[in-house]
Image: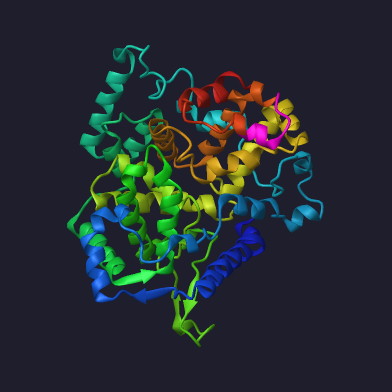
Amino acid sequence: MTLTVLRSTGQGSWERRILKSLNSMCTELSIPLARKRPVGEQKELLNKWNEMGTDEPVLDLSLFRPVYAPKDFLEVLINLRNPNYENGDSHSFRTHLGLIQVPLKVKDIPELKEFFVELGLTAGQLGVDDSTQVPPELFENEHVRIGQKVLSEQDSAAAQQYIRQGSPTALRAELWALILNISSQPEDILYYEQLKTNVIQHDLLVDSLIYKDVKLTASNDDYYFVFEDYLYQVLLCFSRDTSVLGHFAYSSASPPKSYIRGKLGLEEYAVFYPPNGVIPFHGFSMYVAPLCFLYHEPSKLYQIFREMYVRFFFRLHSISSHPSGIVSLCLLFETLLQTYLPQLFYHLREIGAQPLRISFKWMVRAFSGYLATDQLLLLWDRILGYNSLEILAVLAAAVFAFRAVNLMEVTSLAAAEAVLADLSTLKVMPLLQIFLFATVT
């Protein structure tokens, strides 16, 4: 299936729905999409820039609702169809009993084993071989030494290969920056300051959506609530950053446009809104939160997040046929379960607990907010190392495999969700290794 088919049938109508939601909020609340802040308000925001978490926004946040939540997006993906498939093609796909009905090519276990070969049981892994039971001289010490050498040589390709076995905590921030080609030059810091100035001078409707999202997610998270100020700073600047528009050249999505009043449809009176073309949804701030553990200098944190977004995270909330796109990840997850855990898959399907309804929120947030932070960072190491999000679908399937005995006993979706409600004690790397290389043939 081509990207254009998905784009025309799914992404366009989904974007119109998002814009309708945003526009109706504008109308209901009589709030403009953008306004210049009065001078007094600008001074107040500038003074409180580093403590925005303690400051209440000008507008009442209870008036605002997220433009959409992951479950809304899932319903759109479930309804995607390929016209060619309806006409009788892709016969082999007819045996797929999951919610995703778009026949895309996804990897099977042998192909995943080959792709993730460095995760094999014979390879050393941070997240496994650095446990308290394993003497550090057997793997950890040497792995740290190699990591230091990679950093000293500033070799981005070597860093990407190295991190497939996990990054030592002390080296992670530098390794990720090297892989993402981020270096804090004076012009980068200046660019961040210009974005900050834009935030100070202009108020956008999406600012309230950002405040609301942080309050609903990160502020209530035991790991991330301390980073509330950082999250506001990064996300507010991100919304103003027109360089982010560049990723739409290789995305199936289109940036929304706003027209000057009375000039609807006239392109010379159109501007992208928000300026970065990205409307935040419920949980968006969780893409930033884990990075706050690694970077404490705002412009560096900002650059890392922006690069992570335009390389990876945008694929988790746009409709495309890309192997790392959310549609492919959903299909990969369902295919792995149906093929390698058929009894579990059929049982959950029969009781109205389609597994994807549970795992979708994990994948769309790249597991942020669900795993303990140390485990999440080990997972994101591998996303960077393999330049792929497919590991998210594999981990989601591995979680179901790990809890299979309990899940076989449930009789409702609510009971299945209860079994999988807390992932904070899971150890990511052993789960992935066992699922890929030990229990499945």
Percent position (x, y) of residue 108?
A: 63, 33
Tell me: residue 60, above or below residue 184.
below
Percent position (x, y) of residue 341?
A: 68, 27
Which residue is at 27% across, 26% downward?
Answer: 146
Which residue is at 23% across, 30% downward?
Answer: 149
* 84 drawn magenta: no
Tell me: residue 242, above or below residue 81.
below
Tell me: residue 99, above or below residue 17.
above
Q: Is residue 245 visible?
A: no
- Indicate left or right for 125 with 70 as reference: left
Colour scheme: rainbow
Percent position (x, y) of residue 137?
A: 29, 13
**398 or 224, nearer to the observer:** 224
Q: Quadrant of residue 32?
A: bottom left
Tell me: residue 268, above or below residue 69.
below
**4 or 423, nearer to the observer:** 423
Say how many tags the image has: 0
Question: Which residue range is magenta in the image?
Answer: 409-417
* 413 drawn magenta: yes
Q: Is residue 221 visible?
A: yes
